[in-house]
Image (tube, helix red, strand yellow):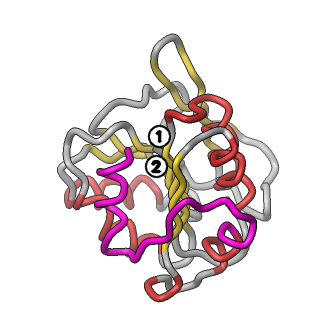
Amino acid sequence: MAIGTSTGGTKALEVVLPALPRSVPGVVIVQHMPERFTAAFARRLDSMCRVHVREAADGDEVLSGTVLVAPGGRHMELIKMGSGYRVRVFDAPPVNRHRPSVDVLFRSVARAAGNAALGVIMTGMGDDGARGLLEMRQAGAFTVAQDEATCVVHGMPHEAVTLGAVDREAPLGSIAEVIHRYG
């Protein structure tokens, strides 16, 4: 499962992640955030959640009950390894003016996991993640966008809806339920 978010996303993730059961499939997240802040953010989320949340490191295995947050200033991709998945954390130029970029993550999830994936795009300015979410949907993944009424900024979800990348729009308070149902 992959989640992408930006402006307003830290508070949105504080609503969604604590509502997830410990049995949830592995989750990978890009939250637009400067380096040096993501490790502390992951620790704060970890203290609030039943799932284990931490900043991702290159080569980390994606495990059930674990959430990996992309480190600020670095991209993160999902890679299929045997019967499981790992993350690749790497330096590269910004994509859509962002590093980490939601599009980089979502496109890799489309390639690696295809119809076994679930993608969620949440509050954020701009369009990062919209095209990657479309690629996920085209690969057979179930895709979700946070609805306009509960977004701080509806840019990223709006662009995804406009592109036809979204199977279901949901208010912030229902996203964890949708994840649990389809994840």
The number of discs equals 2
Residues at circles 1 and 2 in contact by the CB criterion of under 8 Å: yes
Q: Residues within 10 Å of mark 1 (few under 14, many from 20)?
A: many
Task: Specify the amino acid type for callout 2.
Answer: Val
Q: Is 5 or 98 nearer to us in this picture? A: 5
Task: Specify the amino acid type for callout 1.
Answer: Ala
Q: Which residue is under mark 1?
A: 56
| Residue 154 higher or lower than 53, as above or below | below
Secondary structure under the numbered disc 1 in the rendered image: loop
Residue under the image location 39 percent in, 72 percent down? 12
- Tell whether 111 sits left or right of 80: right
Q: Which residue is under mark 2?
A: 69
Secondary structure under the numbered disc 2 in the rendered image: strand
Residue under the image location 46 percent in, 28 percent down? 60
- Tell whether 36 sits left or right of 179: right
Q: Is 123 or 179 nearer to us in this picture? A: 179
- Tell whether 93 sits left or right of 82: right
| Residue 24 higher or lower than 63, as above or below | below
Q: Is 109 or 140 nearer to us in this picture? A: 140
Magenta region: which residues?
Answer: 160-183
